Amino acid sequence: MAQVLEFKLPDLGEGLTEAEIVRWLVEVGDVVAVDQPVVEVETAKAMVEVPCPYGGVVTARFGAEGTELPVGAPLLTVAVGETADGRPTGDGSGAGADGARDGASGREPAAEGSGNVLVGYGTSEAPARRRRVRPAAPVVNGRSRAPEPVRETRRADTPQAAPTTPAGRAAPADGPVPVISPLVRRLARQNGLDLRELTGSGPDGLILRADVEHALRAAGTQDRPDTTRAASAPAAAAGTASVTRVPLKGIRGAVADKLSRSRTEIPDATCWVDADATELMRARAAMNAAGGPRISVLALLARICTAALARFPELNSSVDTEAREIVRYADVHLGFAAQTERGLVVPVVRNAHTRDAESLSAEFARLTEAAREGTLTPAQLTGGTFTLNNYGVFGVDGSTPIINHPEAAMLGVGRIVPKPWVHEGELAVRQVVQLSLTFDHRVCDGGTAGGFLRYVADCVEQPAVLLRTL
């Protein structure tokens, strides 16, 4: 006898309480295997594919694409086992649309937690979430009509039409599409490209971004950015400009919440100084000329930061407002700002104080690539104790960065450019950089912040100063 099991949105870890359905990877009536990815979701931290812990026939899906669900909410139901006539559920004779009930006994499944988890532990119940205002129901003939429910069900024994491509041709059903990167899926989805029609150039036929871009060029289409939802109502009066509303959700919403909280809770202050980085750039050039993996400027600045935090540990801390205590950390988990197609993210290099410049360069490169591919895990985006922000890559000299709550400080680095500079009593053209430090004034005063920034500038101007602490 087939049994219908309900799979709920698992605990994604790191305090995440909800996720948005980006794309369903299975249809109602599909046969799924154990641990097969069934849905692609986006949290405030990253985009992940959620695997199903059951194998059988999908009998119901809960939530349309774009719907935000709390942890513990039903995702889908799967009919597993055998039916009454002895046929396996995989042959299309699974349970009916009532996927929320147990197919054998008719009892509701016990709500004892969120089931299997991806990171961390399960939850006992769906956490509290912010109230959302539902859109008003459309009015037809003077009466309000309730919107259609988002639950989608179909009997497992009902034949399902084959999916079609944008041109209307039936797409081949050859199993899961060999794509790993969520960004590749998004690029294809935005341009109406059916990935099942592509032959991947990667290992074992893996479809890469280059394959999608090549197909789009061949079809004469262009990569289109994310479209935003325009206001549906026409302008109330002549001359009123059209309005575009962009939802604050996903990474953009998480950034907005964190920055607002930082500005609200942290009394920050900023100090800055110009430094002659000519000798630092020469030292880097000499390191790279000696052979071995290349050393990045960011890695050298990170190494200087960890040395400075060892001398000024007040800045490697956070404030516990409830206990009215300053919490100082012995280990430096260094965050760095990385701009991606999905927005600004801050990956964290664990135990940066134990790494040399070569190890830091490799870790920065690895995390940056993962950020661009959208494969960073929540654990790689949390737990930082200090942040390094290299906004010089955007071609700007200075900034007053907002502290990455709940940290106590952030070092900003502008572009390194040739400028007139007095060197050894004479005017010369030198490589100059502006350094800025934004700090929580609760953890220290200006003397400590100024001492930290001055030490960083001294190491930039004379790298030999750093050798004394190695």
Image: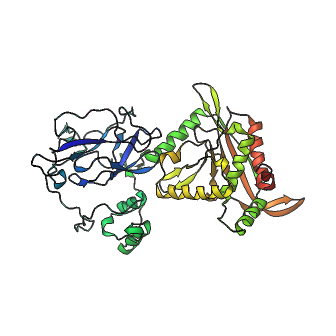
Given residues 49 and 238, the one toward you in this image is 49
Q: Position of residue 39 (x, y in %)?
A: 33, 51
The outermost residue toward the right is 425
150 lies left or right of 363: left
Q: Which residues are magenta?
A: 109-119
141, above or below 369, in the image: above
Q: Is residue 376 in the magenta section? A: no
Relative to 299, 122 lies left or right: left
Is residue 116 magenta-colored? yes
Q: Is residue 450 left or right of residue 407?
A: right
Magenta stretch, overall SS: loop
Query: Is residue 407 placed above or below 29 in the rendered structure?
Result: above
Q: Residue at x 54, y 36 (%)?
A: 261
Q: Tell whether 60 sits left or right of 343.
A: left
Figure quadrant of residue 143: top left
The spot of residue 244 in percent (x, y) is 41, 50
- Say if residue 193 shows up in the picture: no
Q: Which residue is farthest top?
A: 323
